[in-house]
Image: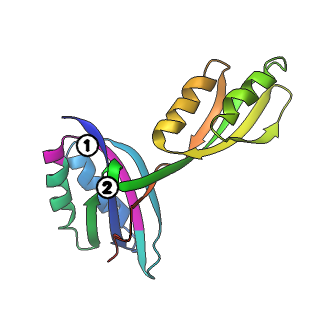
């Protein structure tokens, strides 16, 4: 069954690690849907969160191959039911002034904050699960999206378990 799966990586913070990880993904024929990299809580390490599409067996094999990269200390599939995931979006929506209240009504459902009001545009910031962000985009699309930037997924496992244990 093809589905999007989130993978968490705990890696050494060295030049070239991102290239080695993404090269492996490319060689295996996966498409990266989302990629987020940031410093980890542990000094000298980074945390990568990657969302790819593939069936369970392909992704499990990918995890095993990922662990062969020297700088990868841990790689795990992060199932949706046992993880929390969020991303951020900045989105600029076209407005003619008459639809401003309607746009505010739609964006308020997603707890989006109005950051800038232009003569013919409104810029918002929102955060939520990938599905919530997709729904926001879908709903405001009717007004006209002028520009948007998404951060990519950040995800952690539920409970006390940590990828850097």
Residue found at x 53% / y 38%: 133
Label 1 crowding class (10 Å Cα cut-off): few <14, some 14-19, many 20+? some
> Looking at the figure, which quarter contains the N terminus?
top left
Q: Is residue 138 above or below residue 132?
A: above
Q: Which mark is residue 78?
A: 2
Res. 22 image quadrant: bottom left
Prevailing secondary structure class for the magenta stretch in the rendered image = strand
> Circle 1 sits in a helix, a strand or a loop, which is it?
loop
Residue found at x 36% / y 67%: 16
Position of residue 156 measured from the top left corner of the image (x, y, whole percent)? 41, 61
Q: Earlier in the sequence, mark 2 or mark 1?
A: 1
Q: Which residues are magenta?
A: 47-58
Compared to residue 14, the image places residue 85 above or below, namely above
**Which of 36 and 70 lies nearest the eye of the viewer?**
36
Q: Quadrant of the C terminus?
A: bottom left
Per the rendering, the mark at residue 30 is 1
Q: Is residue 51 magenta?
A: yes
Which one is in front in this view, the residue at disc 2 or the one at disc 1?
A: 2
Residue 116 is one of the magenta-drawn residues: no
Q: CA distance from mark 2 to mark 1?
A: 17 Å
The residue under the point 84% across, 21% down is: 97
Q: Which quadrant would residue 3 be assigned to in this image? A: top left
Where does residue 66 sit, x and y in percent of width and height? 21, 61
């Amino acid at each position: 069954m093809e589905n999007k799966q989130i993978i968490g990586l705990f890696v050494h913070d060295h030049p070239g690690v991102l290239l080695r990880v993404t090269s492996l993904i490319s060689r295996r024929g996966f498409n990266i849907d989302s990629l987020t990299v940031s410093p980890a809580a542990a000094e000298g390490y980074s945390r990568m969160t990657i969302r790819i599409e593939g069936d369970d067996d392909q992704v499990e094999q990918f995890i095993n191959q990922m662990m062969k990269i020297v700088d990868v200390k841990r790689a795990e599939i992060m199932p949706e039911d046992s993880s929390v995931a969020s991303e951020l979006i900045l989105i600029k929506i076209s407005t003619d002034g008459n639809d401003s209240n309607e746009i505010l009504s739609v964006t308020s459902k997603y707890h989006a904050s109005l950051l800038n009001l232009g003569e013919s545009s409104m810029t918002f910031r929102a955060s939520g699960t990938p599905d919530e962000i997709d729904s926001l985009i879908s709903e405001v699309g009717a007004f006209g999206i002028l520009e948007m930037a998404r951060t990519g997924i950040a995800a952690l496992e539920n409970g006390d378990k940590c990828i850097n244990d």
